[in-house]
Amino acid sequence: MGKVSEFLANVKAELKKVTWPAKKETYASTTIVIVLVLLSAVFLGGVDMILSRLIRLVLG
């Protein structure tokens, strides 16, 4: 039990050292991630559609 409480004390000490981002930075980072995910989804969907049509032409 002593090791667990020591571990939790170390975790608490480390969390106090963390520099948490401001609300504005969090929103900006989240927006960038969402936009990049959407762009990636559109790109991959387009590639998938093109390859599917190409395979249908070759096989069909």
Image: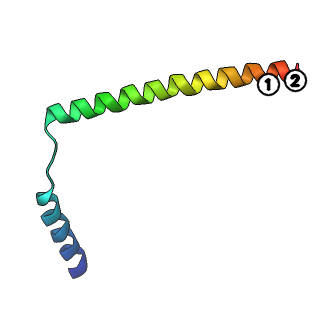
Which element carries disc 1, helix, strand or loop?
Answer: helix
As drawn, the label of residue 12 is none
**Residue drawn at the location 30% of the way across and 27% of the way down:** 31
Residue holding disc 1: 55
Give the total number of marks visible in the rendering: 2
Quadrant of the snapshot with the N terminus: bottom left
Which percent across, then down, holds residue 46? 60, 21
**24 horizontally vs 3: left or right:** left
Which percent across, then down, holds residue 58? 85, 23
Which element carries disc 2, helix, strand or loop?
Answer: helix
**Residue drawn at the location 46% of the way across and 24% of the way down:** 39
Type of amino acid under label 2? Leu
Distance between the alpha carbons at the discs numbered 2 and 1: 6 Å
Neighbours of disc 1 within 10 Å: few (<14), some (14-19), many (20+): few
Which percent across, then down, holds residue 56? 81, 20
Please state which of residues 1 and 37 is positioned toward the viewer in this rendering. 37
Instruction: Verify CB contact (< 8 Å) between mark 2 and mark 1.
Output: yes
Colour style of the rendered protein structure: rainbow
Residue holding disc 2: 59
**Residue drawn at the location 44% of the way across and 25% of the way down:** 38
Vertical placement of residue 29 versus 46, above or below: below
**Residue drawn at the location 12% of the way across and 59% of the way down:** 17
Residue lying at the far bottom in this picture: please name it.
2
Query: Which quadrant of the figure has residue 7?
Result: bottom left
Quadrant of the snapshot with the C terminus: top right
Query: Which quadrant of the figure has residue 26?
Result: top left
Please state which of residues 11 and 41 is positioned toward the viewer in this rendering. 41
- Asked if one can make out residue 1 in the rendered structure from this viewpoint, the answer is no
